[in-house]
Image (spheres, coloured by chain):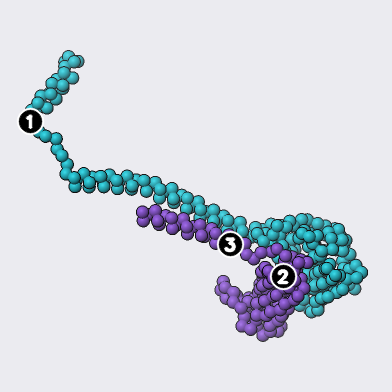
Amino acid sequence: MQPKLPPAFEATLSERIINTVPDMPDHVFSKRFEKKMKQLIQQNKTASKSKITVKRMFICITAAVLAAAIMAMSVGAVRDFFKNFFMQIFDTHTTVQSNDIENTPTSIETVYTIIVPDGYELVYEDEIFEWSPYVCHDYYKDDIYIFFTQYAKSNYKINVNTENHVLKYISVNGYDGYIIDLGNDEYLISWDNGEYVFDIMSNIGQNELIDLAETVYKVE
Amino acid sequence: MKKRLSILLLVAMVLSMVCGITAYAIEPRYVYTGSVISSITISDSSSTAYCKGTAKGDSTVTRIEATQYLEKKSGTTWSTVSGCTWSDSSNRNSLTISNSKSNLSSGTYRVRTVFKVYCGNTYEIAEATSEEATI
């Protein structure tokens, strides 16, 4: 077969078929049909659009829920070890516990005290019972205060102010401890001598407070 | 339209959840509270719980109020033991509250102390919960 024959045959055949069709006016769709069709097309477009939006929204919402969960976890306890202390850090405070309570007294069996500078008045002192978990001594001299407390290590579970304050390591007489600058020259210092935990909170000044902590001794 | 509204509502719900968590985390605040502690000691011989709590504030603190609760564990929830809610106050920047309750039934107990720490007319709430103790 000649190579040009098929296209030529196809062209004449199409022409012949068209010529056999009688002349007819173009079909006009009814207004109702046109309206219905427009509605269907519109609905189809909206459906495909909202499918994408819902999918994207789902991703966004999942991300938001995940972010909320992560936030909730971050404001909860963040556990950390700090030398002899076990700490749970929260947004507003830190809960501090003794890290090693084995073979230590569960109440105040041996009393310790500090050498308070002259002029201070002992305004409050805890009575000591066989069950006492800790003992407080509050001293005042005008606007200066000194709060000295001795804790049985097993009962030392204290919330200290770390909201906008930093907890730093300090050594008192060679024992591990921490100090918090509470602002306005007020400090909280705490240390563990292996037998008990002690803390002193005061507005006496940082160096004076450390010196005061180092005067701690056992009452015979 | 309905779908858009429901999506908006869902987003609002998620946002409110996030905001809710944040608000919960902010309270209570520690601005002028230095430290708070709450402890429990049990005497098995007399089935007595000794409850103690202490709050220490900085030099701006003018008053401290405390409410102490002895709580018993029931399943996973804690409820206050009947007649074991105590209060005390101090017009200094330190307060220690001590109480006891004898003839307790066997179970697991803890002490929760809620401190209202005043700086003039304003106050903040600081709370401390003891370890658990069993009779």
Residue at 69% x, 59% y is A163
Splitting the image into 4 quarters, where does residue A193 fall?
bottom right
Dot 3 amino acid type:
Ala
On screen, residue A195 above or below A83: below
Placement of the C terminus of chain B among the 4 image quadrants: bottom right
Dot 1 amino acid type:
Pro
Kindly identify which numbered label has been placed on residue B23.
3
Dot 2 amino acid type:
Gly
Kindly identify which numbered label has been placed on residue B120.
2
Distance from label 2 to label 3 (Cα)? 25 Å
Give the image location of residue B71, x and y in percent: 63, 76
Mark 2 vs mark 3: give the one in front. 2
Kindly identify which numbered label has been placed on residue A144.
none
Residue at 80% x, 76% y is A126
Residue B131 in view here: no
So how many labels did they put on this image? 3
Specify whether A220 is left or right of A198.
right
The chain assigned the colour purple in the figure is: B
On screen, residue A155 above or below B15: below
Residue at 61% x, 61% y is B25
Residue at 68% x, 83% y is B101
Q: Between A190 and A34, which is closer to the camera in this rendering?
A: A34
**For numbered disc 2, what is the local secondary structure?**
loop
Specify whether A101 is left or right of A220.
left
Splitting the image into 4 quarters, where does residue B66 fall?
bottom right
Task: Say which residue label 1 marks.
Answer: A22
On screen, residue B104 above or below A189: below
**For numbered disc 3, what is the local secondary structure?**
helix
Identify the colour of chain A in the image.
Answer: cyan
